[in-house]
Amino acid sequence: MLPSTVRSRAHNRLRRSGQGAASAALTGLLLATTACGSDNAVPDSAAPDVPADLECFSGSLSGAGSSAQENAMTTWIAGYQSGCEDARIYYDSIGSGGGRNQFIDDAVSFAGTDAAMDPDETEDALERCGGSPTINLPAYTVAIAVVFNLDGVDSLNLRPDTIAKIFDQQITRWDDPEIVEDNPDADLPDLEITPVNRADDSGTTENFTNYLAAAASDSWPHDSSGQWPLEPRESAQGNSGVADTVSRAEGAVGYVEMSHLHGLNAASIGVGDEFVDISPEAAAQVVADSPRSEQTTGEYDLALELDYGTTEQGSYPLVLVSYQTTCLEYPDAQEAERVKAFLRYVVSAEGQEAVSAETNSTPINETLRESLLTSIDAISGQD
C-alpha cells in the first residue's frame, strides 16, 4: 500500500471534477513558479500525457543542476503537476556542478547532472544520505550541437581535430585552410572566430571536453573537466546563455545541448570518413553500445561509460547522457517516496516521449527503463 503522501491519479481525478479549465489555466503559472531558471518549453494549455497509474504526492520536491535538462525538466514538471495538482516540484538549472553541490549540502532532494558523481563527491554525499551510497540514473539522452553564426553559411562540416583547434584557439579565422578543405562549397569569410564556452561548472562542458579528448587527442591538450580549461574568448552561463551569445555575435561558435538550438545552425561532425548531422537517432546509436561505468556504487547505480571516440558509421558521438542523482536510502521516508513517485514518471514512456517531442532527446529503450525502474524501486527511507 502506498504511503499517505503518495496516492493514485484516480483519487486526484475525483478531486478535480469540474476544475479542468482552472487546472489548465494554472499549468503555465505553476511552471513559472516551480521550474526555477527554466524556459517555458510547454504551452500553457497543453500539458503532456501522463500514465494512467501515475503515483502522486502532496507537498513539495526540489532538485537543482543541469541546464541541459532545463527544457526537459520543465516538460516533466508540467506533466506531473497536470496529473498531481497537490504536488509542487522546483528545479533550479544552475549547472551540473552546482546541482551536485546542493544535493551534497542537503539543499535539494535530487541533482540533475550531465556527469555522474565522482568517487570524492560520492564520499561527500554519505552524510547527506544517512550513510547510504548515491545512485546515478541516466534519464535523459541528447546530442550536443556545435553551433555557429556565419552570415550566408547555413551548413558546415567540422572534423574532431578542427573543432578541438577552434576551441583551443589554435584556429582563429573562419577561412583557415583546415576549415576550407572540408567545406569547398561554403563562402567562408575572412573573419575572426569567437569561441564561446560555459562560464559555470557544467556537465555539458565535461561531456564536450570528454569528446575532444577521445576523438581529437592529438589536437586537444587539456584534461576533461566540467570547468573550461583555458582562458576564454567569450563565456556565458548555462546552455541558454551560450546559445544566446552565439546568436548575437557574427563569427561565434559554441556548444549547446540540442534543445537549446533555437534556430541556430549546427555543424555536421566528422566520424571516420563521413560527416554526420546531429539527430536523436545518431546519438542513440552511441548510447546503446555503452557499458556501465567501472566507478558505480553498486547494482542500482547505472552510470555509463560513453565511447566518444567511436567511428561507427552513422553515429553521432558528441552526446550527453544526463542523470538524476539520488540517495539509495534517504534519512526521511517521505522524501524518498516523493523522489520515487516523480522519477517513475520521468522514466515512463509518457514522460520520455513528451520530453523527446519538446527537446529532440532520445527516449530510453525498454531494457534501460526496466533497469531504471528497478533502481528507483530500491530507493527507500530510514523512518
Image: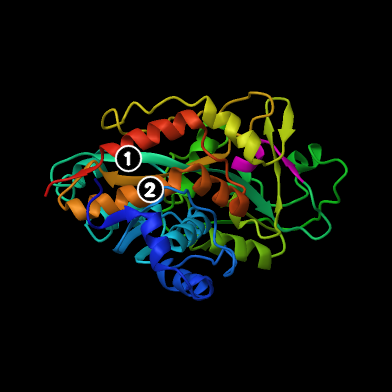
Dot 2 falls on a residue whose secondary structure is helix
Counting labels gives 2
Q: Residue at x 54, y 37 (%)?
A: 212
Indicate the amino acid at tag 1.
Ile
From the image, tell me which residue sits under label 1: 376
Q: Nearer the viewer, residue 155 or 380?
A: 380
Left or right: 205 with respect to 337?
right
Q: Nearer the viewer, residue 133 or 358?
A: 358
Q: Position of residue 123 (x, y in %)?
A: 20, 41
| In the image, residue 159 lies in the stretch drawn in magenta | yes
Q: Residue at x 34, y 33 (%)?
A: 374
Left or right: 334 with respect to 345?
left
Left or right: 77 with respect to 160?
left
- Which stretch is magenta? 156-164
From the image, tell me which residue sits under label 2: 343
Q: Position of residue 218 (x, y in %)?
A: 56, 30
CB-based contact (under 8 Å), mark 2 and mark 1: yes
Indicate the amino acid at tag 2.
Leu
Q: Nearer the viewer, residue 51 or 222?
A: 51
Left or right: 280 with respect to 113?
right
Does residue 150 lie above or below 305 as drawn?
A: below
Q: Residue 98 occupies which quadrant of the picture? A: bottom left
Q: Is residue 351 visible?
A: yes
Mark 1 Cα shell of 10 Å, populated few (<14), some (14-19), many (≥20): many
Quadrant of the drawing holding the N terminus: top left
Dot 1 falls on a residue whose secondary structure is helix
